[in-house]
Image (spheres, coloured by chain):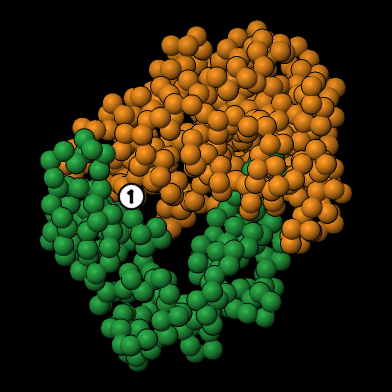
Amino acid sequence: MGSTTDIHKGAVIRHQNNLYVVTSCQFVNPGKGSAFTKTKLKSISSDKGMEITYKSGESVDTVQVERQNMQFLYKNGGFYSFMNQDNYETADVNEDIIGEDGKYLKEGLQIIALMNDGSVVAIELPKKVQYTIKTAPPAVKGDTAGGNVTKVAIMDNDLEVNVPIFIKEGEEILVNTETGEYGGRVGTN
Amino acid sequence: MSHLTHIAENKENLILRFKIIQWIREWFNANGFLEVETPIILRLPGQEPYLSPLKLNVHNESDKGFVGYLHTSPEYTLKKMLAAGFGDIYSLCKTFRDYESFGGTHNPEFTMIEWYRTGVDMFAIMNDVERLFAFIVEKFISVIPSEAEGSPSLSQLPGDFSTSLRSGRNDIAGGFERIHMRDLWKKFVGVNLDEYLTKEKMFGLCVSRGYKPEQSEEYEDLFSRIFIDEVEPYLGKEKPLIVHHYPMSMAALSRQSQADSGYAERFEVYIDGLELANAYCEITDADVIEERLKTEKIKRAELGRDVFEVDREFVEAVRCMPESAGISLGIDRLVQLFTGCKNIDDVLVLPMSELMNQ
């Protein structure tokens, strides 16, 4: 048994006999009154999500998981294949476990796999991932006057991201995998 | 090098941060306020039971010293200054709260502006908030178009509020909505809050809505369970929102409403689901303050937090303080709104999470 201090993104929690991965957690301290931790959870056995808000100090049934570095290889049918970076074995992970994170995967991407009883129960993506813009509509003069400061661009792995209108095809950008938002150009700072 | 990378990556956000701070000072200085400084190290910090001041040892050259704390807000000192005859004042300063998350909407070291007006009630402070906000929006819009015009400097894409402003919807800041807490609960929870002003009633309401509170929970915790899940995320989405009149159990240092005795004259400001500011019409009854601080001190002990004496000089200051109202507003969160940064780290030069990783 743990407490709210053990909650973090990627932690595994047992709730009503099911295992859930914490996909996001937010600390809220209204200042006057106790603090709370708002969590978004995803079931390990299905893609079902739920939200639980814990009062600080409440007991939480956390489950120990191992963290393993893996590299994404390819998607085959309903499975994503990863290579274990320690023993070079391949692990096939059902798409239900990967869920929405699947759209951020691209060949060679390093991720952290959370392992329970030898199988992958969840993956953690890097906070920011670099992509090359495959296609992006050109900026049209007058866009900003009309209120359009962004446009939809397609990345090298087919991920769609809202980017500033000045971004061009072939450029490399960072994308925040927690929000799906544009996170800056690469190498222009 | 990660600190340097952090600064470089967030340079545009940081530039906007410092501009916003400049605009805030400009507005206050033009509106008859005096900027003051207060000490950050205190022996007797705020008693709020749920805040943890950072403790430190201070020594003189002969190795004699005392245990001090970094202030959690400049409130006590500013009120002592009001008691000593200072009029409309503000302090824009760093404040510190231990045991808060490193990132998200909290950082243990953060920036706050706290201001007071004498001889007014909380509605005058609401007017300040609205006018200050309109001023910042006007300044923001005047600098944004040139940056957005195909320039590579716009490194961060905006969030909802920021998007609206950048796409010309400056009406979003044109008018604030003001709503009584009772009406807010009617709207989102579908109940009459007047009937749930006691701990027992609120406990029952929590249970009936599927929460599993413990018997020992205070009124404000029970209130927060429902508020955080069912109300707060939706606040200030269409336009900035001022929620006023909090149940008396959540009065903190605010005055009881004469017209509405179950409620205290306290308000908070919400934009895009984010709490930005907390304001009181101040209690000037020293006996009431002393009672509340003593109760808070006992609560601190129960919660296993550092316990320190009630600041007697603060109590005496309240005795001599003129009628006044004041507010504290989180600068980092304000900057998050304008930059569209979901994580407070992205608007800080050195977030605590970076220090943790060093």
Q: Which chain is green?
A: A
- Residue B284, percent across and down? 76, 17
Residue B278 spot, x, y in % from top left: 61, 32
In-image side of B146 versus B317 (left or right): left
Question: Left of B61 or right of it: where is B131?
Answer: left
Q: Which of B184 and B285 is in front in this view?
A: B184
Give the residue number, with chain letter if any, for mark 1. B6
Query: Could you tell whether A18 is left or right of B150 in the image?
Result: right
- The answer to which of B87 and B150 lies nearer the viewer is B150
What residue do we see at 55% from left, 30% from top?
B177
Q: How many marks?
A: 1
User: Is residue B89 shown above or below B165?
Assistant: above
**Relative height, residue A19 to residue B312 (above, below):** below
Q: Horizontal and vertical percent for residue B70?
A: 60, 36
Percent from the top left, x then y, of residue B36?
A: 53, 17
Q: Quadrant of residue A50?
A: bottom right
Identify the amino acid type marked 1.
His
Q: Is residue A115 above or below residue B36?
A: below
Q: Which of A133 and B31 is in front in this view?
A: A133
Q: Give me the chain that's orange.
A: B
Q: In which quarter of the image is the C terminus of chain B?
A: bottom left
Q: What element carries label 1?
A: helix
Q: In which quarter of the image is the N terminus of chain B?
A: bottom left
- The local crowd at label 1, few if under 14, some if 14 to 19, many if 20 or more residues have their Cα within 10 Å, is some
Q: Which residue is drawn at 85% across and 29% down?
A: B291
| Res. B285 image quadrant | top right
Q: Residue at x 56, y 48 (%)?
A: B233
